[in-house]
Image: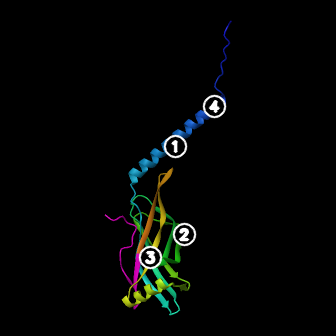
Amino acid sequence: MPRLTSRHGTSPFIWCAAIICAIISIVVIFGGIVVFVGYMVIHPRVPIISVTDAHLDFLKYDIVGVMQTQLTIIIRSENDNAKAHALFDDTVFALSYEGKTIAYLKQDEFEVDKERSMYAHFLVQSSPIPLNPTMMQAIDYAIKQDVITFELKGGSKTRWRVGPLGSVKFECNLSCELRFRPSDHSYIPSPCTSAHKH
């Protein structure tokens, strides 16, 4: 008996899909190469955010165990890259005392030019803060020692444009203590920066 054979040609739809996938792959690879070459040419440094100055404007603490405070905090955003502008976005910091968040510092998206810095002045005013016994002991001790400490944590998402097809993204994070003297409301300078320590 003769054998029956059948031949099924490849569907034009499959050929079209394969061609489209190949084109997309080439575009993605080419775009990756462009971004990589641009990054190597620009070789951007990681941006830096840091607290440059601060002031304890107001501090009130009563025997009932309620604290009110107002601080001025100056944060510098620094772009050391000589060949590209830096865009800072999602900039949020949390200010806390003895683990209790008392205020948030937020800033809208902004751009820092090549080899430039930008300063943001934050006026942080808290609502009346009820203190638990541990916090009451801490603030009593702080006033006796004439040093009160707040914690500042947060950061910003940054990116550089690398050519027309992409950007390089970084995250800048702060986690530090801000110390003040209640007697004269002055700031005790200490390192507070996102720069990597060597």
Badge 4 density bin: few <14, some 14–19, many ≥20, Cα 10 Å: few
First reached walking from the N terminus: tag 4 or tag 1: 4
First reached walking from the N terminus: tag 3 or tag 4: 4
> Which residue carries the number 2 mark?
108
First reached walking from the N terminus: tag 3 or tag 2: 2
Q: CA distance from mark 1 to mark 2?
A: 32 Å
Q: CA distance from mark 3 to mark 2?
A: 22 Å
Q: Quadrant of the C terminus?
A: bottom left
Q: Residue placed at 44% from the left, 76% from the top? A: 151
Badge 3 density bin: few <14, some 14–19, many ≥20, Cα 10 Å: some
Badge 1 density bin: few <14, some 14–19, many ≥20, Cα 10 Å: few
**Vertical placement of 19 versus 62: above or below?**
above
Q: Residue placed at 46% from the left, 71% from the top? A: 153
Does residue 140 appear in the picture of this structure? yes
Q: Quadrant of the N terminus?
A: top right
Mark 4 vs 1: CB contact within 8 A? no
Secondary element type, mark 1: helix
Secondary element type, mark 3: strand
Query: Looking at numbered disc 4 in the image, what kind of residue is underneath it?
Result: Ile
Q: Disc 3 or disc 1, which is closer to the eye?
A: 3
Query: Looking at numbered disc 3 in the image, what kind of residue is underneath it?
Result: Glu
Q: Residue placed at 65% from the left, 18% from the top? A: 7
> Which residue carries the number 1 mark?
28
**Vertical placement of 8 versus 57: above or below?**
above
Magenta segment range? Answer: 177-198
Query: Looking at numbered disc 2 in the image, what kind of residue is underneath it?
Result: Asp
Q: CA distance from mark 4 to mark 1?
A: 21 Å
Nearest the eye: 8 or 85: 8
